[in-house]
Amino acid sequence: MDKLFKLQAHKTNVRREILAGLTTFMTMAYVLAVQPSAIIGGEATLVDIAGVTISREGLMLTCALITSLITMVMAFYTNMPFALSTGMGSNFLLGFAIQGGQLSFGGAMAIILISGIIFLVLSLLGIRDVIVKMIPTNIKIAISATIGFFIAYLGFKNTGIADFSKGIAMGDFTSPAVLLSVATLILIAILHANKVPGAILIGMVASTVASIIMGLTALPTRFASLPNFSAVKPLLFNFNFKELISGSAIVFIFVCFFSDFFSTLGTVLGVAGKAGMLDENGDLPNIQKPFLVDAIGTVLGAFSGNTTVTTYVESSAGVEAGGRTGLTSLTTAIMFLISLFFAPLFLIVPAAATGPALIFVGISMISGLQNIDFSEFDDAFGPVMMLLFGIFHGSIASGISAGILAHVCIEVFTGKAKEVPVGLYILCVPLMIYFIFA
């Protein structure tokens, strides 16, 4: 393991890496329940979409399979502690279109395939790397903090500590689930302050057990079952390319590609920054490798009936637990493979356990803001806009886009137009289009 993943060079060990991989899995296992719900909606177990029977079980199995496969590729090809799965943006976007009759399931997968191919071509040509390097250092520093705020936002939302249904309001603190979430957050913080290894994972396990004892989480009727792969067949190679010949399809392709591009960029830089993997300019050496894996994942995801595959912000939980190499990713991938047989058991982990973990990781990532010079308004304006848009739009892609546009705008109107790379001006065009059509 040391030779394969260069553990000593990264100042880590097998135990720490496995623990980190388990932590990442625990924080992102919710995708196995969310992905099917996003596509077919409600509590239905079977739906007929344009003559094709799509099942919740089938969507869950393909999600687990593609997550495991592409995360393994990330582990061995990049030796970085990143995990990938279906993105929470494109699945709800296309799921809404499918449920509303705008797209068939095959049409949605065709859109994902085309956006993935565009992604792959740009990665192979190295254009993504060029785009990353032309982004100013202050913007790249702010990305990590924006990711942190977004992760904390998800934690507050999922646990009910805050209510976002009508603006922003206090959650119901008479609810046992909310109180358990707060107690879990405090427990994780105390364990971490006392330098207890695996504080996040310990807190999540304790919260799950407490939730069962309190009657908030019911034990499943069965803990294991053989995967029903017949439910997967209708999802494989399900494409309807005829639906690409429309203006709305072009918009969907653009939004899916653009959201994935900047969400991946933000996540990779944010998590890498937390792991201390960035250089003095805020760049990640060999960033083209995780970019390429991400692009391949989206293409393979389309063939297997999954929406856009992207690098997950929850990877930061594993990094916080000490993960520094591909062994962390490999552990996460193996857990998703095992989840094919133990899905009923894994899915009982409640939001009261995963939410506080996300909040804690988010808090730890916000500290990057200290490296931005707020005394220089033109340097701080872009990062601040990035934070505000990312938080209030609930979107990493929106935050990064706004931050870049704000930075270019303030540079131009303060007499520094020549200091802005030409490529950044070109990038501003699709960024503005994104806000119009997203």
Image (tube, grey):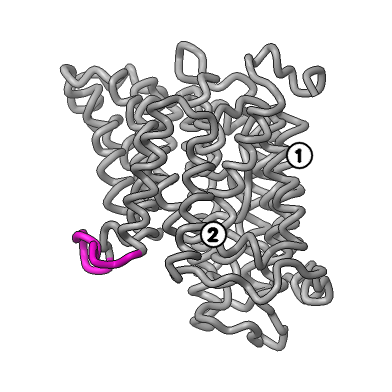
Asked where in the image residue 228 lies, by quadrant, the reply is bottom right
Judge from the rendering whether residue 201 lies leftward or rightward of residue 65; answer left or right: left
Q: Which mark is residue 349?
A: 2
Q: Residue at x 77, y 32 (%)?
A: 76
Q: Which residues are magenta?
A: 165-176
Q: Residue at x 25, y 22 (%)?
A: 379
Q: Which mark is residue 399?
A: none
Pointer 1: what residue? 73
Q: Position of residue 113 (x, y in %)?
A: 68, 58
- Asked if one can make out residue 36 in the rendered structure from this viewpoint, the answer is yes
Main SS of the magenta segment? loop
Decide: few, some or many residues near mark 2? Use Cα within 10 Å; few <14, some 14-19, many ≥20. many
Q: Tell whether label 1 touches label 2 (CB within 8 Å).
A: no
Q: Nearer the viewer, residue 176 or 261?
A: 176
Q: Position of residue 17 (x, y in %)?
A: 66, 30
Q: Nearer the viewer, residue 147 or 98?
A: 147
- Report the amino acid beneath label 1: Val
Query: Callout 2: helix, strand or loop?
Result: loop
- Report the amino acid beneath label 2: Val
Q: In the rendered structure, does residue 166 fall within the stretch colored magenta? A: yes
Classify the position of the C terminus by image quarter. bottom left
Query: Callout 1: helix, strand or loop?
Result: helix
Q: Residue at x 30, y 47 (%)?
A: 391
Q: Residue at x 54, y 59 (%)?
A: 349
Q: CA distance from mark 2 to mark 1?
A: 27 Å
